[in-house]
Image (spheres, coloured by chain):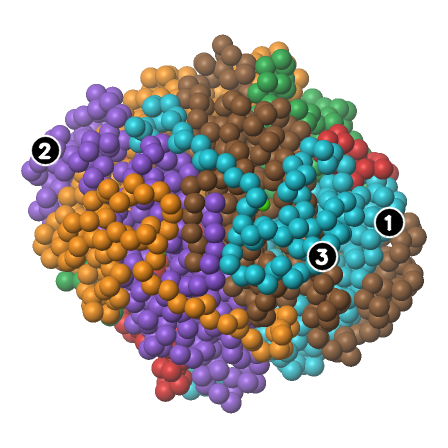
Chain colours: A green, B red, C brown, D cyan, E purple, F orange
């Protein structure tokens, strides 16, 4: 169960209205790596978790914080839009170049659809979608997805930080960025702990019998391009991170098989057949 | 530039037709973490890369291999469908329970749309989409995304391995799973190398000045749920993986701010105002 | 069957070209609550209707009008685009700030994809989709959806009305807005008539036996937030609109159940298990 | 801010595993009118609200309950899937017709992608998307959308109730259905209260000056089909629900305008011109 | 304007209920090449047309017929679903293998969402979307798109024809297939007429000055694979269909350019830079 | 298998940065008819082909070239973005009208998500999707789809050519446009060759027995609108392109059938029934 409190985790009031910035902030709210993604991802991972205890409590513990981040961003965006201009004709743009920039740079659905409110979309107006999230039931895979999510999220927030000098927005971003720092560290620690405790290991899933994979090619770097520098990486020689092999480097494939003949399905499918 | 050779990297011929399995294999071809995602993700990361040399060559080197994996799966699926039954009425199901299972378990668009061919969709028929991929220009973030991609991909292939006993399909899967083992190790090694060389570091992006984030909350675990076990994790005390702080544990938020008053936009937006 | 007449229901010619406005008008054509949604929704409701007579005739009667609204908007948009500028470089923007606004504010696919024509998309360029419509087979539910559709549609048209002073566009909008007035009234009347005639009633679906729902919680307002003002609403005490109960107010849930233990699926799904 | 408690509002444990039912339940979780839609819709309406007090508190108060409904359904689905069969070949179907039904009737991504977990998708596997929700800033329009949402949701739950005889699932459904009863009544009451208090009225938006619409056609029923029964409805004669007019009935349009000539855009758009 | 008549162009009543077939028929209604696509495509081409007269009248003339095809299919699907079974549990499947096939083979949203009605989706339940259609303003390009649309549509209808022996469905299909025959011929004739009249020609767009393209490579077949048989086609030597050149055959590219160095964007975008 | 070479087929370096143009170029990369569509379409057609030899070799031969076009565009876009401005506030727009145009005209996700890199989306930021492609297994249908693809693609490139005077971009476009000229001619020739060789013919699919379609209506032009000029086209009289009939012209339908009565599904679906 979730309970709501009419407070925010941090101050979320802009210094001044800015419809262009409101649109950019939508990426952090409803984008591929926005807060809706993060909140829903931790939620589904918790609901699908198979072991009780610290890992599941971790997912519940921060998942709920993330729904609060969704709220903070939505409220910030609504405030950035509060005084958005309504006159948006070419005529109006003529007299004011900043208005011209706003007309072009804002999300028009902020005005037409939401009446100056936040929306569950990204900065290009693409609706948020369930396929942004990952919840596989395998915790090492999913914590790696979470680490990635927090990295991409912090990266995007940092970029937007430099697109504005609005003090209020920067304060909120500095808070969210700090939380992303925490969560990057946290998922990195949690992934390491899964391996240290032997709960899960590389290669994921670690309980798939290695004897069932083609071990000959399990540690071969195969170069399908003509750049040779990849040979110098730690992925081309030496021991592998999973502790189970040695990398080797190869120019092109080490295996090959003739292409099977074209298929010839039932003629009642009316394909073009011989 | 890409060049094509009419050979496959590995044998990809099923023992027998199986339309149900063909549908499942679509996940590995056109799903969120299917080979199209992997190939396109490495491609865009290479095209957007900012530094020449081993990291970019790595992306080019295996990106092209992954387009070949797309091909192997497409050809396997076409063969699994080659003898798919065309009579698919309830009437026909009456006389043959296996046909009933096939009618229900196959992807109907395999027959109607593709005439027994592979499609750029997942196992539920959702079209592949560009929002599955990640290419941010930040290599540590992206290599983490790649490691996750190879983990989810190997996990799904392993699951499908156990859903069939078709020898040909299992052989192909055992090959792809081995390559996923390689690529999990490779991206883990490459991410570590980025950090070791100081090219990029935690928290990502490492060149965003830490002084611009709210450092007070950068290492606090905030528990927004009522499960207490998360306190025992390595993310709740001790040094942080980025080497820049100490984790601490807190029940609930350590900061709070009153919710701003509701916004009151221009009346010409016809919202419901006071 | 549908028959077409090369006339419009109302004048639809703008006073002058305006590519920015053309983009905004797309919301009314191909948005979530645009005319394509309205036309297709009434169509599918008619085709799925279960009772002959006035309700179905109503759906057929105005559904066809709505396809004509689609046409009026498409033709208006094409005219707004007729003289859209083709030079759209940064260079060109330098010399003319209005051109700069147009470059930013127009839908670029209007030029690149449609050659100055209308498109089946919303004002952010999202393609219209079938999931915008509702046709459940239950008329009270669907007429409520229709009333909502006409409300959202009129609201959006009114907002756009104030974004332009183009006389021709305003005339068309004043006509469409008047028709939305009619249709809001009409669906409200039709929903009331369904209840008055006993064809359908609250709660929808009215023929689901009330004894099969947990009647204890059927009229409880449960407050999961900390704002107390909701207690003052007519939904927190007094008789209920369905005439079958009394509202009551409660702080938080009145029921609770322990969370079930985590699931432990088949190990061959390779989740992270205990 | 949101806080989580590791309890459920109601019991959510199935009597037995049932992968087919798990798929159907996805509609109530991640469908167009599933609990994710309802929760997010109330959330965005609250964040975008313009007046403090009972209406906004109402949105906050039940929005948070709905996130708990999301959780209950996710947990129920995971349990229905807990013992989902992993062997899913045609071969296996041969020996067991029920397995054949399961192979066809289950959501294959439940196994392949989520490892027997719930997913943010509908019963056909379409990802949930932001365009399902409505939050316009106009409360009468939005409360009508909410009433519709609760009607469609209760209707779907009632249908699924009759597709199963699983005692645990039916219990959960009987609870959710009762809550939908409450919420249908609640939004109906709240919409009436908005009108009674003069905060908003028909036609929505009520503060758009009626003089700006083409009043001649504001109450005309125009029959664009050849069914005559719609003439008998309360929408074809008598006073209108908004209290501002009289309905009238007309066969076909009462207005007409010649179609404008085809547009002739810039030749550099390379359309086919005269 | 569109007017509706409560008649169908052809008989559309199935011999018996068949929920599996109803799902397949959705492809013809709401698929990539279904009737909604065809109707909307001709509509938008007409509304975007630049020349009055026979070509535009042609688009209007058959566009309206296609909306009637949408209706015929929707009504056929509703009838196929009229007696769809409601008991759909695993339990029920146990006693009846045909029911098992139906549970797997039907579109579950037909029952849960539409209450045994048609939906604007394809045979996998993907919602119809605006990006299926093509209306570029260039008639030769668009008529080619139309010819393709009628070919794919007839192909799919022919495939479904062989998936059923329901007499009523086959009759409807035989009618729609005949109309597709007409429309394939019609668009082929119309495309030829455009060229014969010099209104438009190959290469499309014919009014783009040929001198602005790299004429050296305008008729070169470049073989980027290792199959040599393509050399034997009429596209590898001899005069070209546009009457403006001669085909030639080349193994691989005839031009090449060094890859530009990696980009180095502003450091405030926090990419991984040298 | 695919092999990559770190060279481009043609020079792809812009004269100067231009974020607005970068956005427009996305249409050619990731739009409905962009290079990703073309490359994937030829790929899937090859993998699904049923006859070995020249037609399949053709698909392989140019499919691989098209993946190189994807790469050229991605690299061009990254270069156009290399110096994209990071300061993007309203404040900044005030001092520089060109910056205002850029803020409005660029794709904001280029900066926020990709850090000045290309993305798999169209010029409105819609993600590329698998439903853009066509691969039916019927070569005459598919080659017609391919001809259309190359026409729409060349048309869009020609439009963008006139939106810029950047010498580098125009050079790349002049190359891609020339290749589109080749490919339009090539698919036209290949389609003719299929017919000449009797491999496939009009109407597609040619092996569906004509006796199974309603031949009475196979060559009738039925005018469902009131424009009479379509009577003058070659599609209204004379021999048909398939060589199997004579066109005839009719005002309106030549067939008609009464609409079936409304359906009455199982009451447990809770539709509104009589
Ligand atoms: Ca966050
Ligand atoms: Ca792979
Ligand atoms: Ca309308
Ligand atoms: Ca609920
Ligand atoms: Ca048709
Ligand atoms: Ca190309």
The quadrant where ligand 5 appears is: bottom left
**Element at label 1:** helix
Residue A162 position within the rendered picture, expressed as x and y whole percent measured from the top left = 63, 25
Q: Chain of mark 1?
A: D
Q: Residues within 10 Å of mark 1 (few under 14, many from 20)?
A: few
The yes-or-no answer for disc 1 within 8 Å of ligand 4 is no
- Residue C235 is left or right of residue A223, and the answer is right
Q: Chain of mark 2?
A: E
Q: Which mark is residue C189?
A: 3
The answer to whether the residue labelled 2 contacts the one labelled 1, judged by CB atoms less than 8 Å apart, is no
- In terms of image quadrants, where is residue E76? bottom left
**Element at label 2:** strand
Residue C250 position within the rendered picture, expressed as x and y whole percent measured from the top left = 90, 61
Which residue matches tag 2?
Answer: E246
Residue E201 position within the rendered picture, expressed as x and y whole percent measured from the top left = 21, 33
Determine the residue positioned at 22% across, 53% down: F248
**Residues at marks 3 and 1 on the same chain:** no
**Residues at marks 2 and 3 on the same chain:** no
Which residue matches tag 1?
Answer: D196
The yes-or-no answer for disc 3 within 8 Å of ligand 3 is no
**Element at label 3:** helix
The residues bearing labels 2 and 1 have C-alpha atoms spaced at a distance of 79 Å
Can residue A180 be seen in this snapshot? no
In the rendered view, would you say B217 is above or below D93? Answer: above
Determine the residue positioned at 26% across, 66% down: F214
Residue F194 position within the rendered picture, expressed as x and y whole percent measured from the top left = 14, 52
- In terms of image quadrants, where is residue E202? top left
The residues bearing labels 3 and 1 have C-alpha atoms spaced at a distance of 18 Å
Q: Residues within 10 Å of mark 3 (few under 14, many from 20)?
A: many
The number of callouts visible is 3
The residues bearing labels 2 and 3 have C-alpha atoms spaced at a distance of 70 Å
């Amino acid at each position: 169960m979730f309970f709501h409190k009419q407070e925010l985790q941090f101050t979320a009031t802009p210094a001044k209205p800015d419809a262009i910035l409101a649109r950019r902030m939508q990426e952090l709210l409803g984008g591929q790596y926005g807060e809706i993604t993060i909140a829903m991802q931790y939620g589904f991972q918790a609901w699908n978790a198979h072991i009780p205890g610290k890992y599941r409590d971790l997912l519940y513990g921060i998942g709920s914080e993330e729904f609060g981040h969704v709220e903070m961003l939505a409220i910030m965006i609504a405030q950035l839009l509060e005084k958005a201009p309504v006159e948006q004709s070419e005529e109006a743009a003529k007299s004011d170049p900043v208005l011209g920039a706003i007309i072009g740079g804002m999300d028009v659905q902020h005005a037409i659809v939401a009446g100056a409110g936040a929306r569950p979309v990204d900065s290009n107006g693409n609706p948020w979608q369930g396929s942004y999230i990952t919840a596989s039931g395998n915790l090492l895979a999913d914590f790696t997805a979470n680490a990635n999510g927090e990295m991409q999220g912090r990266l995007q927030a940092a970029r937007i930080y430099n697109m504005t000098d609005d003090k209020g927005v920067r304060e909120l971003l500095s808070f969210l960025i700090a939380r992303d720092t925490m969560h990057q560290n946290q998922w990195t620690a949690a992934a390491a702990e899964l391996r240290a405790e032997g709960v899960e290991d590389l290669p994921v899933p670690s309980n798939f019998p290695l004897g069932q994979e083609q071990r000959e090619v399990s540690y071969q770097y195969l170069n399908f391009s003509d750049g040779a520098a990849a040979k110098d990486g730690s992925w081309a020689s030496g021991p592998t991170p999973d502790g189970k092999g040695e990398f080797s480097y190869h120019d092109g494939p080490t295996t090959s098989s003739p292409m099977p003949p074209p298929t010839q399905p039932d003629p009642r499918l009316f394909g073009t057949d011989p």
